[in-house]
Amino acid sequence: MELMDVPECDPLKLERTYQQFGLVNRLFSGWRWLYVRELRPLLSAYTVTTVLDIGSGGGDLARLLAQWCHRDRLMVDVTGIDPDSRAHSFAAGRAPNPTVRFRQAGSGELVREGRQFDVVISNHVLHHLQPPELEKLLTDSQALAQRLCLHNDLRRSIAAYGLFSLAALPFRGSFIRSDGLISIRRSYTPAELAAAAPPGWRVRRHPPFHQVLVHRPNQPDD
């Protein structure tokens, strides 16, 4: 378990961790490239594209995607969900954005409600899940997504561990470095992730040390 997931963890360190996630994701997660290549081609200036961010944490990715869409004059509606009340409180407590909303919920709740979205994404969620939990998330994602599922996660390697250990030194007073190293150790290799994923999902390496699990509903494997 990562330190920030402990219910009794230091609340000040947790707050700083959520605050620092935005910069960490901009530097290391590669979402700008994923937005340009995978998401932006699906978006329109005339109709709203709905996006569900599963495990949205502090909400930085949901807000960042909305910001990029606004700059590109594309219409989007982003919903971020997270079952952790602390993450939800932080995300919902930030300055409001009319195209972004947050909800304390898991993906299964939305499936039971019959909700659907054009795109379903997640960031750094897969490594938290054991195979049965991963299977449920992917099953839920397929039920929720109409056009694209995109789960971006860490890719385990010695190089990733060593480089992040150094790169995260400036992030003091938070759980960024300690939990990041735990996350890398827990993350899947591409072969492990491909073996755990059901048919219709494809693993793509995403530089420098990430991988993306992709599913396109109603389309043959690409």
Image (tube, grey):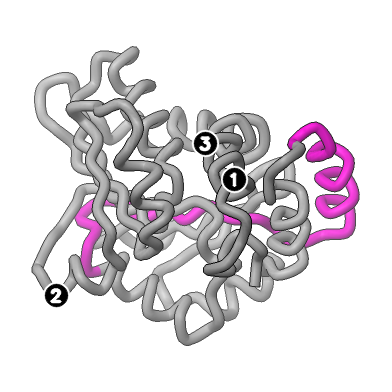
The mark lying in front, picked from 2 and 1, is 1
Label drawn at residue 112:
2
Residue at the spot 54% in from the left edge and 31% down from the top edge: 33
What amino acid does circle 2 point to?
A: Arg
| Secondary structure found at label 3 | helix
Q: Is residue 96 above or below residue 6?
A: above
- Compared across the picture, whether 215 is left or right of 154 comes to left
Q: Which residues are magenta?
A: 143-171
Label drawn at residue 62:
none
How dense is the environment of label 2, judged by Cα within 10 Å: few (below 14), some, or many (20 and up)?
Answer: few
State yes or no: discs 2 and 1 in contact (Cβ < 8 Å).
no
Residue at the spot 76% in from the left edge and 55% down from the top edge: 178
**N-terminal label among 3 and 2:** 3
**N-terminal label among 1 and 3:** 1
Residue furthest bottom as drawn = 132
Mark-to-mark CA distance, 1 and 3: 27 Å
| Secondary structure found at label 1 | helix
